[in-house]
Image (cartoon, rainbow, N blue to C red):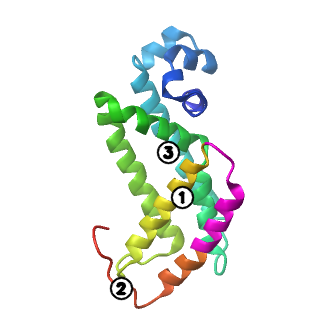
Amino acid sequence: MDATVDCLAELGWSGTTTTVVARRAGVSRGAQLHHYPTRAELVLAAVQHIGAARFAEVRERAALLPTGPGRTAAVLDMLARLHTGPLFRAMLELWVAARTDPVLREAVVPLEAEVGCETHRLTVELLGADESRPGVRVAVQQTLDMVRGLGISALLSDDGPRRRHVLDDWARRLDARLSDQHLEAPHGPA
């Protein structure tokens, strides 16, 4: 599973062949094909497996996050790391490949929906956000869209200093939005 995600993140969809994965994982091609007859099955199983492990790791790290001042910035740092690591790069490869491959798309869309819902739920929990208040759900989704965008921009160059500035600024704004008792109702879909 790790070898598959590593190949996706390093070599992309086109470079992630079952032969390359089997070689990297140190298993025979026959053993690999017995368990995962197609590349799509292998890749999706790997992403689901690693995704579950990643969320377990995030939960462990979340227990170490500070409480009080600085918590929002720490949560944003954690989210940014989630969206700049190998699993995120592997998922991006799947998204791009699924755009033109209907069979892969059929498998990736529900997987992405599941990961997206879990990430949203985890973010709400970590921020202590009350989504029953007007505007809070939108603020959480804006946060996730922003860290995803930062992750995409980090693919081609190291933009760490700019990312740090953006995250610090957003942490201050998000703290204000989450604590404001008079948020206006959002316009448009949440």
The image shows a total of numbered marks equal to 3
Q: Quadrant of the C terminus?
A: bottom left
By secondary structure, the bulk of the magenta-drawn segment is best described as helix
Q: Who comes first in sequence, dot 1 or dot 3?
A: 3
Say left or right for 101 vs 161: left
Q: Residue at x 60, y 43 (%)?
A: 155
**Quadrant in which residue 80 is drawn:** bottom right
Q: Which residue type carries mark 2?
A: Glu
**Does residue 103 show up?**
yes
In the image, 36 versus 79, the foreground residue is: 79
List the single residue furthest toward the right. Answer: 161
Q: Position of residue 173 (x, y in %)?
A: 55, 78
Camera-side mark, 3 or 2: 2
**Structural distance between the alpha carbons of marks 1 and 3:** 20 Å
Mark on residue 184? 2
- Tag 3 near tag 2, CB within 8 Å: no
Camera-side mark, 1 or 3: 1
Segment colored magenta: 156-170
Q: Give SS at disc 3.
A: helix
Q: Residue at x 44, y 72 (%)?
A: 139
